[in-house]
Image (cartoon, grey):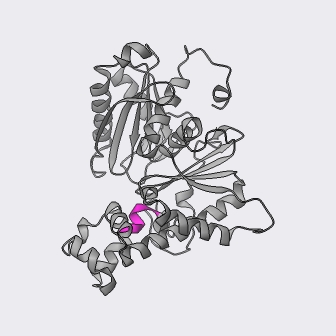
Amino acid sequence: MGRTRYGHALTIGVDIGGTKVAAGVVAPGGRVLARVRTETPERSKSPAVVEDTIVSVVEDLRVEYPVRAVGVGAAGFVDEHRANVLFAPHLSWREEPLREALSSRLGLPVVVENDANAAAWAEVCSGAAQGVDDVVVVNLGTGIGGAIVLGGRLYRGRYGLAGEFGHMTVVPGGHRCECGNRGCWEQYASGNALVREARELVTSESPVARALHQAVEGDVRRITGPLVSELASKGDRACTELMREAGQWLGAGLADLAAAFDPELFVVGGGVSEAGDLLLGPAREAFEHGLTGRGYRPEARVVAAALGNEAGLVGAADLARDALPTRRRRITRRSRRR
């Protein structure tokens, strides 16, 4: 079996978002040998419920595989020690000592990382950003996560909080964000933003939203980001316009990030990005239009992530493997990047 072939090099990666918990046993090189997926517990419940869910999926996976460590990609602010979740807008964690809690229950080394950082690391090591040293990754899911790779190294900032692009203010006084501020970028270019706008169209009984209204039989609670993407891919005018608006907000934000970081490449991942050119086409147009010094500077490429929904768990597992104190470091470009 695979567990014999890979010996003791296996780790588990867990990716926790606002709506799902995905976990997998990952071998060196990013191959996922086994997977588990479940829903994220309601955020109104205690943090211990989310912790119980993580322990449950890890225990299910380790029955068949001799894993050595666990990496957790959390949708929130993770401190510089990769131990505590300081704040998770879409979860119930507030200054949560997640690494200690999980390692004591699992009896394994645990690394906690921001979920976007984990996904970015996977894309750099084995995805769309291989061979690129300066990359900005933007993940569009329930909210917007971000990550920065500079000079081939994952940049976390002094306190571990770099890359929280979703909470840049793009519309002063705009829509209220769950982080407590108004007008955050993720209120205009995320899955939540897409759903909010679609629901408003249906609630207002706009004639352009007829297909969307029929698809959910008038029940706006049934509107989801994937549904909007599906209808847009079939040519529905209203949903296509919604995707275009989200893409334009995305591109405008990327232009601002280019001014700050000047990367060679932008990688756009997350569930919303699966809409492909329906989203990325308008994003590239808005990016080119908003780029400072346009026409007189090299332009970063904007590409879709290659690893899909598994990027977060693959990256978390790889970071956990790299953090093992007994691991023999390989003198390669990848080992230097940590």
Image quadrant where residue 325 sits: top right
- Rendered residue at 52%/34% (across/down): 82
The N terminus is located in which quarter? Answer: top left
Rendering coords of residue 293 (x, y %): 78, 68
User: Could one spot residue 66 in this view of the protein?
Assistant: no
Work out whether 276 lies above or below 264.
below
The residue lying furthest to the right in this view is 296
Residue 118 image point, x, y percent: 51, 39
Residue at 64%, 19% in the rendered image: 330
Q: Identify the image quadrant of residue 34.
A: top left
Where's the C terminus, which quadrant?
A: top right
User: Residue 14, percent across and down?
Assistant: 39, 36
Residue that protrudes farthest toward the front in the picture: 234
- Residue drawn at x 58%, y 35% as measured from the top left: 125
Whether the magenta-drawn stretch holds residue 84 is answered as: no
Residue situated in front as seen by the camera: 39 or 87: 39
Residue 138: image x %, image y %? 54, 53
Hey, which residue is sitting farthest left in the picture? 217
Residue at screen point 39% across, 20% down: 67
In the rendered structure, the answer to whether residue 1 lies left or right of residue 147 reads left
Q: How many numbered marks have been drawn onto this rendered protein structure?
A: 0
Q: Where does the magenta region start and end? A: 190-195
Q: Quadrant of residue 70?
A: top left
Give the main secondary structure of the magenta stretch.
Answer: helix
Figure check: 108 above or below 154: above
Q: Is residue 198 visible?
A: yes
